Image: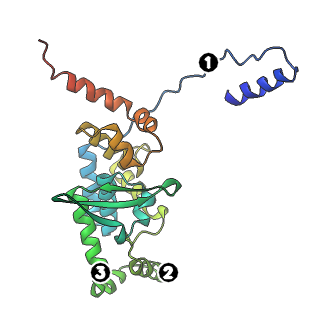
Amino acid sequence: LKHLTGAFSYAKRISLIQENPFLEVQKPKVSRKKIRFLTDDEIEQFRLLFKDQPRWRLDSFNFALWTGCRLSSIITVKKTDFVRKQWKDETDCLIRLVEKGEKEREIPLLPEPLELIQERIDFLNDTSRHKSALELIPRVDNYQKSLRRIQEGYLFWEISDRTTVTHSFLKARRELGLGNDVTFHTLRKTFATYGLEQGLSLETVQYILGHSSFRVTEEAYAEITKRKVINEFKRVKAK
């Protein structure tokens, strides 16, 4: 509609037509799909399924769920991206992310992802553990790639491409009998949904998710915000 309006406006300016028929046309309202997030039961189902599989599957699942990170960040984050910052009498633990548009941000870590990161850093720093871990890698080319990623300090050294994680997650989804609306990206939406329900502001969620504008976050999670307002209002007592 925008392009048609512009084209006919130009046609009117050069006197090809007398009036622009699209000026009075209203842009149709697009109804946003309801946010699909994982329930507590679904989260536990995934964890139980991944428990006896290669460690990176459970770790990447939990990391996305606990931080709201994009899959691209999980693949590229390194141990040097883990930072500690002193603020007065407190030490804050953060992870540095570089995502869309090369924008850099540092997000705070809950105790659970902090423990996961520390375990992975300990592994990367302990060269005596690398050989036995690499022996579990099935193919020679994957072995060399994983070895290089260990040496370069990637936290999730086992994962070098999106396809590996996506296929693993979709296979798990099928085994659990979940629908096509559940993808790895759903973990990011689950983080945001539970964060908002537990009191995080939209501004905080926007920053952590790395949305380009506040409006993107506001529109995406409007229904959750509305539900939060209703629940909070129920606690109000009239005077």
Q: In the displayed structure, would residue 172 be above or below residue 200?
A: below
Residue 193, compared with residue 173, is above or below; it is above
Tell which circle, 3 or 1, labels the residue nearer the N-terminal end.
1
- In the picture, which quadrant includes the N terminus? top right
For badge 2, the amino acid type reads Asp
Residue position for label 1: 26
Q: In the rendered image, which residue does mark 3 sit on? A: 125
Taking the spot 41% from the left edge, 38% from the top edge, the residue there is 217
Q: Which residue is mark 2?
A: 141
Circle 2: is it few (<14), some (14-19), or many (20+) Cα within 10 Å? few
Location of residue 153 in the rendering, given as x and y in whole percent from the top left corner:
38, 76
Residue visible at 33% across and 86% down?
131
Q: Residue at x 31, y 52 (%)?
A: 65
Pick whichever, 174 or 133, lies toward us: 133
How packed is label 1: few (under 14 Cα within 10 Å), some, or many (20 or more)? few
Q: CA distance from mark 2 to mark 3?
A: 23 Å
Q: Residue furthest front?
A: 88
Q: Is residue 37 left or right of residue 211?
A: left
